[in-house]
Image (cartoon, grey):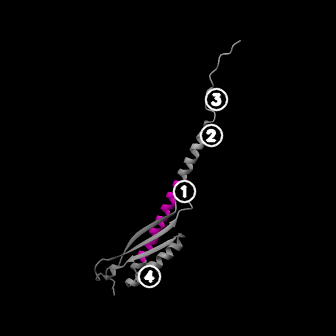
């Protein structure tokens, strides 16, 4: 008796497709998770640097002179970085204290800028190195406080 050739079953046709899907899907999923972690890490760093800049601006604004304000901003910036456990490769804290030259009775502000260069090599994505995170915050000076 002659047997007619049979068509391969659907199950036979799909043999090995699960491993192919896994070979393509798993790396793509891991890349997506890594990008989400990177975005979260960068966002947290930006928020921390903004908070440090706000601390520096506030410390500068309650100082009595422009020189004291520069020193207070730098000290507050360094202390804020330490408190928030930021690991800055380089840290720059600067304060614009030109508001101290404004006559009493005129509204004035102090601006603090904090720049922190952070290392992103802990995230498992190739090509990542350092990133500079900068934040600038403004704090008002007391309008009627005597200024030297």
Residue under pointer 2? 19
- Furthest toward the top, the residue is 1
The spot of residue 88 in percent (x, y) is 51, 70
Q: Which residues are magenta?
A: 34-58
Q: Classify mark 1: residues with Cα within 10 Å, few (<14), some (14-19) or many (20+).
A: few
- The residue at 45%/66% (across/down) is 133
- Furthest toward the right, the residue is 1
Residue under pointer 3? 12
Residue 126 tag number: 1
Say which label, 2 or 1, has the lower sequence index: 2
Q: Is residue 87 depicted above or below 103 in this figure?
A: above
Give how far apart the Cα atoms at labels 1 and 4 are: 40 Å
Give how far apart the Cα atoms at labels 4 and 2 are: 62 Å
Say which label, 4 or 3, has the lower sequence index: 3
> Looking at the image, is mark 4 or mark 3 nearer the viewer?
3
Residue under pointer 4? 71
Name which quarter of the figure residue 145 lies in: bottom left
Give how far apart the Cα atoms at labels 2 and 1 are: 25 Å
Give how far apart the Cα atoms at labels 2 and 3 are: 14 Å
Labelled pair 4, 2 in contact (Cβ < 8 Å): no
Labelled pair 1, 3 in contact (Cβ < 8 Å): no
Q: Quadrant of the N terminus?
A: top right
- The residue at 46%/68% (across/down) is 49
Q: Is residue 39 depicted above or below 14 in this figure?
A: below
The spot of residue 53 in percent (x, y) is 43, 72
């Amino acid at each position: 008796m002659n047997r007619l050739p049979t068509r391969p079953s659907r199950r036979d046709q799909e043999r090995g497709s699960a491993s192919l899907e896994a070979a393509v899907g798993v790396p793509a999923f891991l890349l997506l998770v890594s990008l989400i972690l990177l975005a979260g890490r960068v966002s947290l760093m930006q928020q921390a640097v903004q908070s440090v800049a706000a601390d520096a601006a506030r410390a500068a604004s309650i100082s009595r002179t422009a020189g004291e304000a520069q020193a207070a901003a730098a000290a507050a910036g360094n202390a804020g970085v330490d408190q928030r456990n930021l690991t800055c490769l380089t840290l720059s804290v600067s304060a614009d204290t030109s508001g101290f030259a404004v006559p009493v009775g005129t509204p004035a502000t102090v601006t603090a800028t904090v720049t922190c260069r952070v290392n992103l090599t802990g995230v498992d994505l190739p090509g990542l190195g350092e990133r500079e995170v900068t934040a600038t915050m403004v704090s008002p000076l007391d309008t009627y406080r005597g200024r030297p």
